[in-house]
Amino acid sequence: KESLDQGLEKTKEGFFAKITKAIAGKSTVDEEVLDNLEEALVSADVGIETTVRIIERIEARVKQDKYVNTSELNRLLQEEIEAILVDAAEQSYKDFGIPEGKKPYVILVVGVNGVGKTTTIGKLAHNYKKAGKDVILGAADTFRAAAVDQLTIWSERVGVPIVKQAMGSDPSAVAFDTVQSAVARNADVVIIDTAGRLHNKAHLMEELSKIKRVIQKVIPHAPHEVMLVLDGSTGQNALEQARQFTAATDVSAISITKLDGTAKGGVVLAIANQFQIPVKYIGVGEKIDDLIIFDKHEFVDSLFK
Ligand code: GDP
């Protein structure tokens, strides 16, 4: 909870400074307050579409209640934000459990290079291991030597095995080896890194579906999770990446990194509103413990505290 508060500090400062300014000297919510609020939301990277939705709903409630004072505005805003955020239906991720009948639990991790994919995999592996799970990593980003090296460092840091092959080998062959090895070891969790090249949608789509097909030869309903990692500090770019990856494959969960260094945390809202895919984890630092399990109540609480 404390690290969540710290991680969101910059977003909170930016956001609230603007909201405070938006209502300065006003006792009731009028058009001008709403205009200023709109501006504050957009500049916190909530995105136009999501901002308009929030403003329209607040406007409707203000009309209904006639005189809404500005201190009530915070409460309205909190409620509207919470209504937009999406919690995953299956809650097992919150204690790093394995859903019934899904062992080994296979997580395919996608996202462009540099967003914090490897770091997120390392943090996830650490958390699963802490929860008593046997974890195995697969280095299926065979295009960058640095990606395999980084993932190897994380596997050593966490103390979990990693499956890799020579550079340039077929990513789906690595994925196949990884799940086979997981079954042989009776592992609980498999986390597979993939290449984050986005220059060609058809190619990305083809590559990810090939990886999935090959995994399914070993484990029929896997991957159980396709996790998209997005860099929260890139604001609207993260939204664009979400658009491209969700068009290329069935993304089932999102992790948002680097929320600690940015005032653009509003992007979490934009993503939830536009894609209806649950955010499961947020990254608030480079260290192994800097991964927070996303909970919408806690997130909103922390923003408004
Ligand atoms: P990848 O190319 O997507 O695998 O990215 P990496 O995992 O190598 O991360 C890129 C950089 O972002 C590294 O310097 C990480 O330490 C840093 N990073 C990753 N996650 C976070 C985070 O949540 N907060 C901060 N501040 N830095 C992060």
Image (cartoon, rainbow, N blue to C red):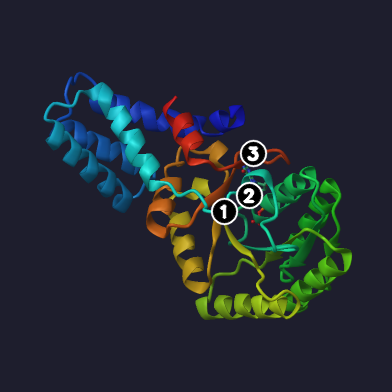
State yes or no: Cβ of the residue under disc 1 lies below 8 Å from any atom of ligand 1.
Answer: no
Q: Residue at horizontal 61%, vertical 30%?
A: 3
Distance from label 2 to label 1 (Cα)?
A: 7 Å
Mark 1 residue crowding within 10 angstroms, few (<14) / some (14–19) / many (20+):
few
Looking at numbered disc 1 in the image, what kind of residue is underneath it? Answer: Glu
The secondary element bearing badge 3 is classed as loop
Percent of width and height locating residue 192: 71, 64
The reply, left or right, for residue 136 in relation to residue 9 is right
Mark 2 residue crowding within 10 angstroms, few (<14) / some (14–19) / many (20+):
some
Residue ID for mark 2: 93
Residue 35 visible here: yes
Percent of width and height locating residue 65: 15, 31
Q: Residue at horizontal 55%, vertical 77%?
A: 205
State yes or no: Cβ of the residue under disc 2 lies below 8 Å from any atom of ligand 1.
Answer: no
State yes or no: Cβ of the residue under disc 3 lies below 8 Å from any atom of ligand 1.
Answer: yes
Whether residues under marks 2 and 1 lie with C-beta atoms below 8 angstroms apart, the answer is yes
Residue ID for mark 1: 90
Q: Kindly indicate the quadrant of the structure image that contains residue 73.
A: top left
The secondary element bearing badge 2 is classed as helix
**Residue 137: mark in rendering:** none
Name the residue at the front extreme: 100
Whether residues under marks 1 and 3 lie with C-beta atoms below 8 angstroms apart, the answer is no
Looking at numbered disc 3 in the image, what kind of residue is underneath it? Answer: Gly
Residue ID for mark 3: 285
Looking at numbered disc 2 in the image, what kind of residue is underneath it? Answer: Tyr
The secondary element bearing badge 1 is classed as loop
Distance from label 3 to label 2 (Cα)?
A: 20 Å
The reply, left or right, for residue 95 in relation to residue 252 is right
Going from the N terminus, do you reach mark 3 or mark 2 first?
2
Looking at the rendering, in which quadrant would you find the N terminus? Answer: top right
